[in-house]
Image (spheres, coloured by chain):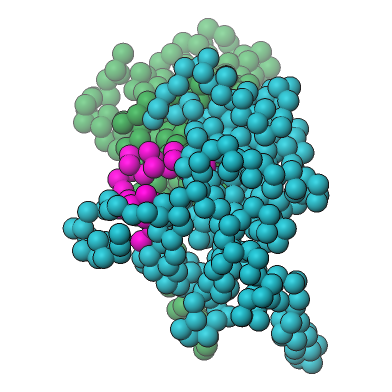
Amino acid sequence: MRPLEKWVFDWGSAVVDGVTTIGDMAVFAWRMCVWMFTRKPKRGTLLINFYQVGVLSLPVVALTGTFIGMVLAVQSYYQFHAIGLESRLGVVINTSLVRELGPVLAATMLAGRVGGAMAAVLGTMRVTEQIDALTAMGADPIHYLVVPRFLACILLIPALTIMADFMGIVGGYFYSVIILGIDHAAYLNHSREGVVGFDLFNGIFKSIFFGGIIAVVSCYRGFHCAPGAEGVGKAATAAFVYSFVLILAIDLFLNIVLDAVYFWMYPSGTSLI
Amino acid sequence: MSFRKANEGGADATPAVQTDALIDVVDVSVVFEGQTILQDVSLQIARGQTVAVIGESGCGKTVFMKTIVGLIPPTDGHVLFDGSDIGRLSQAELTRTRRRFGFVFQNAALFDSMSVFENVAFPLRQDVDPVGEDEVRGRVMQHLAEVGLPDTVATKRPAELSGGMRKRVGLARALILKPELVVYDEPTTGLDPIMSDVINELILHTRRRYPVTSIVVTHDMNTARKVADRVLMFYPRWRLSDGESQILFDGPPSDLEHADDRRVRQFVRGEAGERLDELTRQVDSLTNSK
């Protein structure tokens, strides 16, 4: 094969593979939605997934949220101090956290901690024929394995986001007021002015999409895992990488849409609350 | 009664037709990513029969077995179970039909996150035919006892069991719904000769105790000879000449040694034959090319 033919062949194959994967994933997500609305998952399978996705993720989300709040304070302080506006640090920290960093951070932690594990567990089940066994016993693997994970992700990620927001705000306050010595009252007053109800809604609304993406991508990768230990490892890695890239892409899209909605609903920039 | 004629009516034909055979495989072909694994395979399996499917690795035994139970859809042809075309059943009908099958996977395929009890109880706890918890407990303990496992095993996780115990748990799980068809995928692979014989005895015991039809996919000639009424030997599609059937042998195990086809006799005796010459040529060619 000549170099040009090989180049065309390689790129053509990559495009066809990409389109096939997107189509497959859409069918996978559709089947999951059909099952979600036609048969209720069992309480036992839901609770286990809620515990693993929600309860076990809380400490790590809280910890990283706290550090991100403090890092924002460290990074912003000198610029604000140079123009004498350090008491307004809270506005920047809190707005950044509530609108953007809280949801993205919670989603990233969820993708890393839970998404990778989901892909690895389902991939192992695929490789060891446990998914075939489910089918052979008359249970639909998507209903039994994917729906509870999806519900756990979309229902609990808002709580994780609120935790990341809260701990980030606490971390930012702690570093700004206790370590950097910014006036407590001024910091709080300015912080209160900066964040509006729509910011909080914005972050939580986006997080639901992030949770859905993590569940669908991770479960899909697990279900379509290549044989062997290497296949499982690749599935776990791919689950995180694809989830993260999609989270950022959807974040951009939703920010544009939500900003447009906000300015359409409140032309003068009025708060929801 | 001929089911094939009844099934030749295309998409409008009724999927359920009466037949004396429990399983009827009609011109089934399976192609994966351009590679033909099964081509025009046709056979019938009568009720109550135990069929051993033998053949070298990669000949399509497991694909054949998974096609029969509807885990792999055939690219072409039909699989009829009790007169119903598996490929034409709705999802709900297929789910119900699958509950008439018991499947013992090669490595047992037990759910790691569940205890042995929960694994065996799993088919009973599905929504299709709900069973009370008292009955679940009774049936699980009865089936564990039938495969020779003590009550204490019930609380253990699959990872805590030996290979033989896992296979027996897999068998208990496969039998708990009192299936009409039990499919065993390499039931004795990876087990010592004594445990292999225990599994063979369990297959025979199952057949004596329940009116089941069994398909045993195996490499183990002892298993084939001991448990089967009938042996099918598959051969890899890519090694056959045009027009040759993929099933090289179909008969009772006692005829295996005297089969007309040299390839069957070689397989039964474990002789490499021309495959060794082929391998030698490949090694020589690789060595010379360096």
Residue B236: image quadrant is bottom right
In the image, residue A173 sits, relative to residue A39, either above or below, namely: above
Q: Position of residue B94 (x, y in %)?
A: 36, 44
Look at the image and say whether residue B98 sits in the magenta stretch.
yes
Chain identity for the colour cyan used in the image = B
Can residue B155 be seen here? The reply is yes
Q: Nearer the viewer, residue A109 or B255?
A: B255
Q: Residue furthest left?
A: B12
> Left or right: where does residue A168 sit relative to residue B201?
left
Q: Position of residue A200 (x, y in %)?
A: 40, 22
Look at the image and say whether residue B158 sits in the magenta stretch.
no
Image quadrant containing the C terminus of chain A = top left
- Residues in magenta? B78-102
Can residue A105 be seen here? The reply is no
Q: Colour of chain A?
A: green
Q: Nearer the viewer, residue A127 or B233?
A: B233
Residue B103: image quadrant is top right
Residue at point 68% right, 54% down? B226
Q: Position of residue B38 (x, y in %)?
A: 48, 69
Residue at point 38% right, 65% down? B26
> Left or right: where does residue B160 sit relative to residue A47?
right
> Left or right: where does residue A203 sit relative to residue A126?
left
In the image, residue A185 sits, relative to residue B147, either above or below, namely: above
